[in-house]
Amino acid sequence: MAFEDALTDLASKVSEYRETLQTEEATKNAVIMPFISRVLGYDVFNPAEVVPEFICDIGTKKGEKIDYAVMRDGVVQMLIEAKQIGTPLTLENAGQLVRYFHVSNARIGVLTNGQYWNFYTDLDKPNVMDEKPFLRLNLLDVDPYTLPELKKLTKSTFDLESVLVAAEELKYVSAVKAEIAREFAEPDEDFMRLFATRVYEGSLTAKMREFFLGITRKAATQYINDRVNERLKSALQGQGPAIGAAVPVPDTAGADVEGDSDSETEDADRGIETTQEELEAYNIVRAIVASEVPLDRVAHRDTKSYFGVLLDNNNRKPICRLHFNRKQKYLGLFDGEKNETKIPLERVEEIYDHVDALRATVDAYVD
């Protein structure tokens, strides 16, 4: 299995198993050993490659064990300390890893709870493991920029020197990205002042500071949504109707129809003008549910009453409806009984607020 495919498959296992992994041993067996084996490519049953319960006697501390030591040519290259899934990853909880890194040949220390993987080296002081990881991996939200560096640690392409050369930049890029994300989610006063002073010439009184904190938070959220929407539209241009293009209405003859009135079916037969905004919304819905089903299974039917998004082009499997032919726009969501609830929308991008509901609807049809 290819590197990326192995990561994707293991991520699905983490999502599936996480509620049942009640112990550290269960986490090791279900997630951590498969990661070492399938993602990094080491034979977990070959003690020349992976040594479980690696004994690390240090000074007066005898019999301490590291969960796994990854070997190459008889030399320890990586030390891995495992925790139960859901356990916070802090160096205070990883004493053996910190201590043994200091006296071993290993240049890579790994602390993981199965979902999160933190990779450390000794950038700040030789043979002393850094307090901050140079590489962070979340299996449920993989940052594609980290994958080339992670791949350098796999058995087939192991390149320690290249990893260490890139580690310092990776460490600080990762840290800065985390700070940017934190500021965008909850802007502090310094961040607010940076932008407020550029757009507001008055005095930043307590009342205005509070006002601009809210403005900054809203602007940051809208900026991210705009960028995501642009990327989605760009990615989907070759897979769905082009924005603004004429869209033919599918032939509904012979299709299963449920919940549509005769007048609505007649409307569809007459031909409908599909708007750019409806297509933007349709592409957003397709992108959201692409995690559950292939994109070619998501179709649309436009009527004068609403724009329907369907699974398998089947009206018995409505994913949602877009009621955009009036001043107040609505997103129609369906429950398990196919009852529709209309959610008012101010902007098309607000569909992203209903990711879980849309995916749950599709999952109900797939299951």
Image (tube, rainbow, N blue to C red):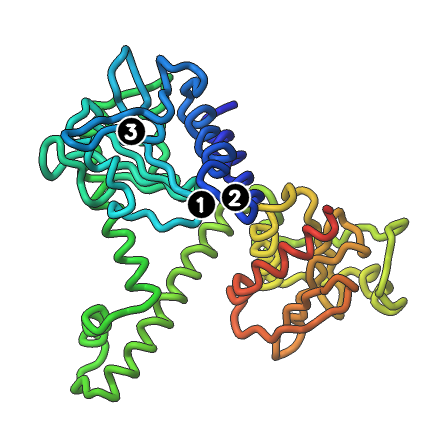
Residue shown at 43% from the left, 61% from the top: 225
User: Which of disc 2 and disc 3 is earlier in sequence?
Assistant: 2
Describe residue 106's horizontal placement relative to residue 311 as left or right. Answer: left
User: Which of disc 2 and disc 1 is earlier in sequence?
Assistant: 2
Q: Position of residue 353 (x, y in %)?
A: 53, 65
Query: In the rendered image, is residue 143 in sight?
Result: no
Compared to residue 136, the image places residue 269 above or below, namely below
User: Which of disc 3 and disc 1 is earlier in sequence?
Assistant: 3
Q: CA distance from mark 3 to mark 2?
A: 23 Å
Compared to residue 194, the image places residue 55 above or below, namely above
Kindly indicate whether the residue at mark 2 contacts the one at mark 1 (C-beta within 8 angstroms). yes
Name the image quarter holding residue 113.
top left
In the image, which disc is placed on residue 21? 2
Compared to residue 255, the image places residue 63 above or below, namely above
Residue shown at 28% from the left, 25% from the top: 55
Q: CA distance from mark 1 to mark 3?
A: 18 Å
Residue identifier under label 1: 85
Describe residue 151's horizontal placement relative to residue 260 as left or right. Answer: left
Packing grade of label 1 (10 A; few <14, some 14-19, many >=20) is many
Furthest residue in direction top, as rendered: 73
Q: SS of the residue at dot 1?
A: loop
| Amino acid on which disc 3 is placed | Leu
Q: Position of residue 23 (x, y in %)?
A: 48, 43
Residue identifier under label 3: 79
Packing grade of label 2 (10 A; few <14, some 14-19, many >=20) is some
| Amino acid on which disc 2 is placed | Leu
